[in-house]
Image (cartoon, grey):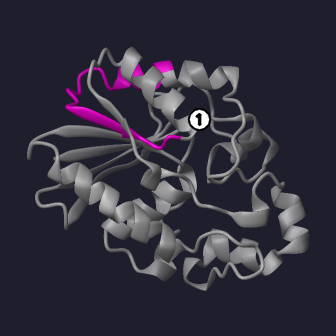
Amino acid sequence: MKLYFIRHGKTQWNLEGRFQGAGGDSPLLPASYQQMIQLGRFLRDVKFTHAYSSPIKRARVTARRVLREAHQRVPLTLMSRLEEFHLGVMEGQTFASIQERFPTELDAFRNHPDRYATQKVGGETFTQVIDRMTPAIQTIVAHNPDTANVMIVGHGAALNAEINALLQTPLADLRKRGGIRNTSVTVLETHDGQYFDLLDWNNTSFLTASATPTDTI
């Protein structure tokens, strides 16, 4: 089974350098719809059996648009366990303001997942996010054929943590593969839902727009 993990299209808050989290959301940028079209066309030769998405608007809109452009008429299931990190008081705030108020937490969130503590900011730790997302992935694997291609649309920070955890990356090293760009696709393969192999990481070869720093988390 191959799992195609897709990060949602770029939003206004992404552009502004703001944390969105599970409790925040902002409109998808007009340019992001063109990127969804490009991704959908890139995936047209992949025959999906099912698609899953976070219920947050930016993710579910992305899922529906990519499926449409990929000419895929398959069920789309929304799963709350695929939501972005709950980020407490950081949601809606700019990275610059969080750097001033919570420099230790911001550095840990970006660079040292094993040190990220939420007593001051609220929300979820990396371990808590992984613990809620992994059962969702196991459920998806259990409910699809062994040779299926499955689409999973979610959010940058949560997908980064979960994908690396599925690859049995130590907590301290979750960020070492780098970030995940908006409208990118990362592909894992599994035979049993327990062990996963990485086939493709953060693929954006199909996008015509050049990457900018605010595209990736």
Q: At 69% across and 26% down in the image, what residue appears?
A: 29
Asked which quadrant contains residue 137, the reply is bottom left
Q: What's the residue at 62%, 52% (across, down)?
A: 22
Visible residue check, residue 179 = no
Q: Residue 94: which quarter of the image?
A: bottom right
Regarding mark 1 in the picture, which secondary structure is present there? helix
Q: Is 196 situated left or right of 204 in this image?
A: left
Q: What residue would you read off at disc 1?
A: 58
The image position of residue 121, as x and y in percent, is 76, 73
Residue drawn 33% across the image and 56% down it: 136
Q: Position of residue 5 (x, y in %)?
A: 38, 45
Quarter of the rendering occupied by the C terminus = bottom right
Q: Farthest residue in the left direction?
A: 146
Amino acid found under the numbered disc labelled 1: Arg
Q: Quadrant of residue 152?
A: top left
Q: Which residues are magenta?
A: 37-55
Question: In this view of the protein, can residue 83 be seen by the observer?
Answer: yes
* Residue 198 lies in the magenta-colored region: no
The answer to whether 213 is drawn above or below residue 165 in the figure is above
The verdict on residue 49 being magenta is: yes
Where 214 sits versus 157, above or below? above
